Image (cartoon, rainbow, N blue to C red):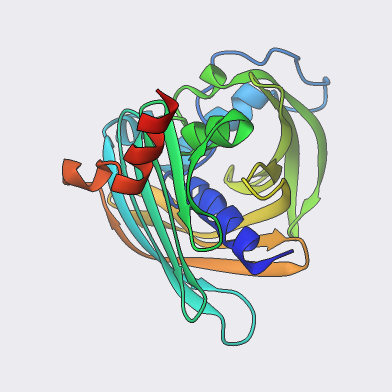
Amino acid sequence: MKPMCRMFAAVLLAIHALSAATAAGVATQDSSGPSRSLPGAADLFARHVAAVGGAEHLRSTTSLHTVARFESGPGVTGRLETWIAQPDRMVARLTIDGIGRVDTGLQGNVGWMIHPATGPKLLDGMALHQLRQQADLHLDLEPMRYLERAETVARRVHAGRDSYEVRLKATWGEEYTQYYDATDGWLIGVVRRLATPMGDVDTVTTFADYRDIGGVRRALRTTQQVGPMEQVFILEHVDTGQVDPTIFQLPRAIDALIRTRR
């Protein structure tokens, strides 16, 4: 996989991993229903929310600023900084030392990227759907807004942990898998194909080292297998105070692209 494609995949995955305590939540339904020996997906979602601090703490977060250290192979390092505010506002800035920087953002229905290999670009289709889902700070509380189906299908070892496997189908047709620790309730893994402007990317993400930060337990270490490359994000800073709204202003190059489409 090309390095720049990996960079964009890393941005999307890291937004998912660092912007919220989980990618699941308090589901209002389990549309497919579990087998008799397995807990329902809704039960697993609720267990995870309880484990990370409860719905009240998650609901109180309406903006977020995170900083994470990035490592990928010998000598490849960088930094990811992410700003998110409800509703539908996000900017992520991934800088890889000696390679370049990718900026990705969301403002309402406008998803965008500025990439050193492709320049400014508007996102659409599945890439935009995934970005909006992953940038939703309250995804935990309303996961079925994005899902057509969620079903617990097996109990198996994932990332060395006894876990439950949940298969999900998004409202835009995408299918992916999440894993929940059978003992602690944590979300510990996601297997998903991410859409990028340079092609789809198969990813395996593992969450570890949950710690209490301001009343919400977050995974401090996120490991992502993207093709043959392993990428690690280590969360170093979390701030749930109000984000300066000017950070979400569209870059001039993106604004120009929007005007050409009108």
Question: In the image, is residue 87 above or below residue 13?
Answer: above
Check the image and name the residue furthest to the bottom. 75
Quarter location, residue 205: bottom right
Quadrant holding the N terminus: bottom right
Horizontal side of 154 relative to 170 (left or right) equals right
Of the pair 42 and 31, the residue shown nearer to us: 31
Quarter location, residue 27: top right
Residue ID at (30%, 31%): 86
Of the pair 124 and 242, the residue shown nearer to us: 124
Q: Where in the figure is residue 209, as x and y percent of width and height?
A: 52, 62
Of the pair 158 and 93, the residue shown nearer to us: 93
Residue 241 appearing in the image? no
Residue ID at (46%, 30%): 139
Horizontal side of 240 relative to 218 (left or right) equals left
Question: In the image, is residue 111 above or below residue 17?
Answer: above
Horizontal side of 167 relative to 52 (left or right) equals right
Horizontal side of 111 relative to 48 (left or right) equals left
Q: Where in the figure is residue 44, as x and y percent of width and height?
A: 62, 31
Quadrant holding the C terminus: top left
Of the pair 81 and 98, the residue shown nearer to us: 98
Residue ID at (43%, 44%): 20
Residue 36 appearing in the image? yes
Q: Where in the figure is residue 8, as x and y percent of width and height?
A: 56, 55
Question: In the image, is residue 215 above or below residue 119?
Answer: above
